[in-house]
Image: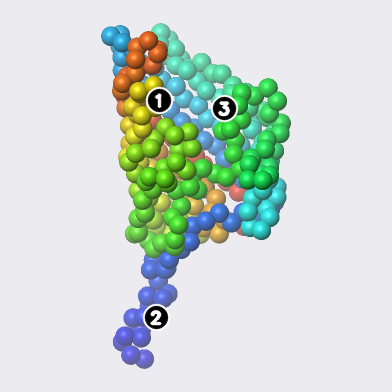
Amino acid sequence: MSRALILVLALLQDPSTAKIELRVRPVEGDKLESSDTWTHTFRGTLGEEPVSFSTRGGRRLVVDMARVENGNLTRKVVQVADAYVEQQDVQTGKYIRKDDAIHGRKVTITRRDGRDERSGLDGVPEAEQKSLVLDDPLTRLFPDTPVRVGESWEIAGEGLKKVFTGGDFTDGRIVVTLRDVKDVDGRRCALLTTNYDVSGKSADGVTRELRLLGTLTVWIDRGYILAMTQSGRMKTSGADPKSAQPNGEAAVTGELKASVLDKTK
């Protein structure tokens, strides 16, 4: 066997040189339990007055991939085991908990004619209802084409509208890199890093700049997000004191961990 052929075979057998496709491949009956937490610690001014506050929150969800049609998830059932926000009391330093309206609900999300329909949310404000969606928003960070370890891709322009559906951030870019492919609890996973450097200006003249660094762990066979971390800062400027919106900077963090339930492999 020639030296050149040996080299070619070695490259073919080396998983670090192979391209992988990251996309959602749901399987009907899959169940995942996920827990996410976030913090928001703000310091700034409201008019001429200094202001500071700290808020944190989280959710624990059990998600059943209830129906898959032609490879696409069309129905899932979400048991909201926990959903809360805690505001820190500035005098005592203690956090005061308030359950979200979706806390304890069992929600069915079904896609019909391209739209998500939700049941089990009577009396829940619309904004909270829309926080429960059929497709994991983090999967919008996946590349459009297969990638190798070490390759990066960029999300900008129209792509930002898919990530930030509320239109909060319209300028800048998100850079995602495939850092490694490895087994995690017996599942072949892609390890990604994320770098957000985005900004946006709302109709009331408030400008927000967001800079975040993070990681994602993706189960390649399914495209499910099994872990996520994010940390960084968000700067707010241009707010009119009459609007009761402060200007300043917040330290923000987020973390998610998910586990696969039942007999899914």
Residue type at mark 2: give it.
Leu
Q: Nearer the viewer, mark 2 or mark 3?
A: 3
Residue 99: image x %, image y %?
A: 59, 21
Q: Tag 1, which secondary structure?
A: loop
Any part of residue 76 in sight: no
> Residue under circle 1?
203
Residue type at mark 3: give it.
Ala
- Whether residues under marks 2 and 3 lie with C-beta atoms below 8 angstroms apart, the answer is no
Q: Which mark is residue 9?
A: 2
Q: Earlier in the sequence, mark 2 or mark 1?
A: 2
Is 174 situated left or right of 74 in this image? left
The image quadrant that residue 229 belongs to is top left
Residue type at mark 1: give it.
Ala
Query: Image height check: is 223 above or below 134?
Result: below
Which residue is at a point 57% across and 45% down the rendered structure image?
135
Which residue is at a point 35% across and 84% down the rendered structure image?
6
> Residue under circle 3?
127
Distance (Cα) linking label 2 and label 1: 58 Å
